Image (cartoon, rainbow, N blue to C red):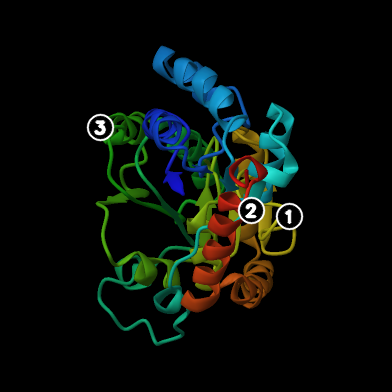
């Protein structure tokens, strides 16, 4: 089996090898590239990738979708449901699920002891993560809750623009940037609210990580939302790129510690059901690849 990590440049190489050696082609779709128009409108090269990727996934012997949302979008493209396997992205959540005293000096509550609530957002500083709308929403939140703090952990090409937006919004004393670090679990376990403003996510592992840390979330309707994270169960789901909804949801959780605690408890409990062992995850992968290998065209 040839398995390619995306249906674009890697997919083209895989397809050529598939033709040359008559080996089954397995395509992975992690990013929900076909679920909205935002990504393909971002630049011309993405539109070209979109057209080719749509052509390729229809011809693959098997497609691995990172979430049920991605699988639905593949079906809408014309991919046979029988060719789709839904297999989420997983990782070791042990560090996120720890319940310790948070005595580490790097813990956010130690850094900002007077904050009414600490909002944490984590991810690559790129346009698709839409940190700009989060910062604009937090500007309005800070008017209602002047001691609230927003902490953004990540690095990327949009950093200068985002720092500039913070300065322009007069938020330099309310918003902190922390470069990407291996201490993400520590920051999650010492924050009060997790926020995700992405335009799109294939799965959104960071949502599961935040849930494991017991954080209530304010997240856009992307990735594993509706599959793992549910509105008004582990937090609040808001429409993509809706500044008003993001503002109101954050303000509601800041003002209601009891609601935060209730959502966080449910999040921590529910996240455990989605943590696969290495053995079970390997078995799921083996079943996926075996299913691709026995497609009828290769039985002759």
Q: Position of residue 160 (x, y in %)?
A: 25, 32
Indicate which disc, 1 or 3, sits on the residue closer to the N terminus: 3
| Mark 2 and mark 3: Cα distance apart in space | 37 Å
In front: label 1 or label 3: 1
Depth check, front residue: 41 or 249? 41
Query: At 39% across and 77% down in the image, what residue appears?
Result: 95
Horizontally, is 215 left or right of 175 in the view? right
Whether pointer 2 and pointer 1 mark residues with C-beta atoms closer than 8 Å, the reply is no
Label 2 crowd bin: few (<14), some (14–19), many (20+), radius 10 Å: some
Question: 212 or 52, which is in the foreground?
Answer: 52
Q: Is residue 221 visible?
A: no
Within 10 angstroms of label 1, few (less than 14), some, or many (20 or more) residues? some
Residue to which mark 3 is pinned? 160
Residue lying farthest top? Answer: 44
Judge by depth and name the residue closer to the eye, 123 or 81: 81
Q: Distance between the residues labelled 1 and 3?
A: 33 Å
Q: Of helix, strand and loop, which one carries label 1?
A: loop
**Are discs 2 and 3 less than 8 Å apart at CB?**
no
* Image vertical order of residue 12 relative to residue 252, above or below: above
Q: Is residue 21 visible?
A: yes
- Residue for point 63% across, 70% down: 267
């Amino acid at each position: 089996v040839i398995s390619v990590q995306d249906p674009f440049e890697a997919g083209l190489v895989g397809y050529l090898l598939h033709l040359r050696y008559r080996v089954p082609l397995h395509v992975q779709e992690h990013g929900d590239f076909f679920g909205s128009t935002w990504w393909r409108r971002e630049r011309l090269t993405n539109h070209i990738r979109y057209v080719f990727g749509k052509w390729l996934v229809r011809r693959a012997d098997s497609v691995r979708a990172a979430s049920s949302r991605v699988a639905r979008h593949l079906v809408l493209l014309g991919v046979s449901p029988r060719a789709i396997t839904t297999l989420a992205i997983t990782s070791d959540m042990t560090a996120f699920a720890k319940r310790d005293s948070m005595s580490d000096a790097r813990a956010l509550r130690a850094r900002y002891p007077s904050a009414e609530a600490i909002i944490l957002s984590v991810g690559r500083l790129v346009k698709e993560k839409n940190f700009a709308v989060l910062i604009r929403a937090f500007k309005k939140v800070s008017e209602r809750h002047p001691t609230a703090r927003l902490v953004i952990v990540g690095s990327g090409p949009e950093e200068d623009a985002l720092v500039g937006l913070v300065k322009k919004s007069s938020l330099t004393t309310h918003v902190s940037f922390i470069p990407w670090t291996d201490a993400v679990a520590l920051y999650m376990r010492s924050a009060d609210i997790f926020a995700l403003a992405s335009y799109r996510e294939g799965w959104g592992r960071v949502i599961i990580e935040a849930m494991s840390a017991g954080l209530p979330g304010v997240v856009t309707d992307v990735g594993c939302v509706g599959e793992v994270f549910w509105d008004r169960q582990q937090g609040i789901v808001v429409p993509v790129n809706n500044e008003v909804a993001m503002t109101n949801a954050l303000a509601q959780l800041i003002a209601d510690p009891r609601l935060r605690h209730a959502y966080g408890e449910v999040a921590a409990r529910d996240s455990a059901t989605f943590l696969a062992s290495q053995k079970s995850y390997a078995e799921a992968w083996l079943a996926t690849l075996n299913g691709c290998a026995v497609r009828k065209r290769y039985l002759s």
